[in-house]
Amino acid sequence: MPLRSRLAMLVATAVAVAVAASAIACWLLTRTQLRSELDNTLRRTNVPPSYVQSLLTECHPDETKLDNAQPSSVYGQVVGVNGGRCVASGSRGVKVQRQDVAVADGAKTQAMHDGVTDHGEAVRVFTQRIVIRGIAGGPAGEAAISISRPLDEINTTLNRLALFLLAVAGIGVVGAGAAGLWVARTGLKPVDKLTGAVEHVARTEDLTVRIPVEGEDEIARLSRSFNAMTAALASSRDRQAQLIADAGHELRTPLTSLRTNIELLARSDETGRAIPPADRKALMASVTAQMSELASLIGDLQELSRPDAVREGPLEVVGLHDITRVALDRARLRGPELTITAQLAPWYVRAEPAALQRAVVNVLDNAVKFSPPRGTITVALDRGVLTVRDQGPGIPAEDLPHVFERFWRSPSARALPGSGLGLSIVARTVRHAGGEVTLTAPPSGGTLATITLPGAPTPPPETP
């Protein structure tokens, strides 16, 4: 069943229950009020002694003598202590009940109850004690008189009221169903638009679709969430396409060079023309360097291809100073002619050890790559702030906003080996650890890289 039909049915059902409850309450309240008024009327009925004496004079204890009696507005009879009765001529006899006998023998002063005549007519009975003499079936002075009125006079009114309430309830339910269907159609129009947009995206993969947002209700929030989702998906797809295009461009250069060198080596073997040993050694060195560059590029691409929510491993409390020392040893091997000084104060952080070490290595590699021969690199770690400063040419101010973009390389660095992904990996790793990284150009020259990471509790010392 469609949602709008279910909503209309729900509204109609809710209204039907409310109308039914109201109708039943109204009917019961009216019934109680009418019976209360009838009871008050019976209580206020004044029974003169002459009526009682005439009733005793015309007493008909045998109900067979009353078959021709016609219904009237008030029935009267005298009840004795033994349950006997005297019914007036022209009245209908009402079956005696225990409450009436209890009033006759003095156990109760009066009683009000429902009763039935000998002909099956429902009546309301009010019985009270009277003091008379000469009543058959009991000593003088002990008797009761019952005054009854037919219940048809209120039952007819109640039946008419029930029919009226039933008609009103039926009309209300039908109207509620129609109103619920109209409300459902009107209220679900934004949902229909959202459904159409989702189906359009699923059919065409067009992520530029946007839904107009009006108001601040749940539908508007859902529309905003959908627009934000499609925008994020479109941005992710654009980044993916850009990553593929940039990766293809970066891979083309080393592959072309590698192919050229291999073809030269192969042609030398096919033609029998030996390549001079020095040239052959240079070709092999070039092939080795290009293969290393390809391996590094592929590793960087694998790192960047992982979603931000996927990590290499759980976060651990590690010493940033220890990781920096290991990275410094690698940097000294890559730049043996450089002077690298370090002052590292202990600082523990919560991060992925392997990823954090790669980030620090990338920063130091950049410093080694751009430092002049016999230059100096200064490394310091103090209270969670790791700084790496070199004496290279520095970064122009107009290039600083782009240094952490994927595959971006400054014009002065395009002739140097590298893929342009190192700093992107650094920024991503530092963000995962809850820190931040910046590159600045100090007035004295060179480049200053700053990594700031929040501290973590110092781990307990390992037991030997």
Image (tube, rainbow, N blue to C red):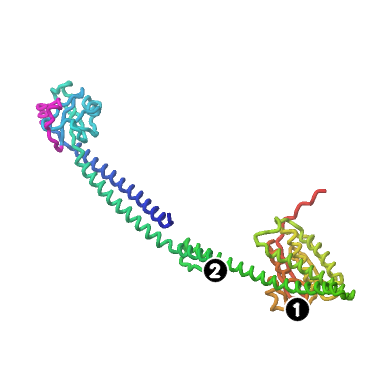
| SS label for mark 1 | helix
Q: Nearer the viewer, mark 1 or mark 2?
A: 2
**Above-or-below relation of 156 to 278:** above
Instruction: Please give the residue where the numbered disc 2 appears in the rendered image.
Output: 206
Image quadrant holding the N terminus, namely bottom left
In the image, the segment drawn in magenta is 49-73
**Above-or-below relation of 261 to 431:** below
**Above-or-below relation of 224 to 40:** below
The answer to which of 2 and 375 lies nearer the viewer is: 2
The answer to which of 256 and 328 lies nearer the viewer is: 256
**Residue 192 found in image quarter:** bottom left
Is residue 404 visible in this depiction of the protein? no
- Residue 338 location in percent, x, y? 85, 71
Distance from Cα at disc 1 to Cα at disc 2:
40 Å
- Residue 423 location in percent, x, y? 72, 69
- Residue 23 location in percent, x, y? 30, 48
Is residue 367 visible in this depiction of the protein? yes
**Residue 298 found in image quarter:** bottom right
Amino acid at dot 2: Asp
Count of residue discs: 2
The answer to which of 198 and 125 lies nearer the viewer is: 198
In the rendered image, residue 136 lying in the magenta stretch gets the answer: no
- Residue 20 location in percent, x, y? 33, 48
At a point 43% along the width and 61% down the height, the residue shown is 188
At a point 22% along the width and 26% down the height, the residue shown is 101
Instruction: Please give the residue where the numbered disc 1 appears in the rendered image.
Output: 412
At a point 15% along the width and 27% down the height, the residue shown is 63
Q: Earlier in the sequence, mark 1 or mark 2?
A: 2
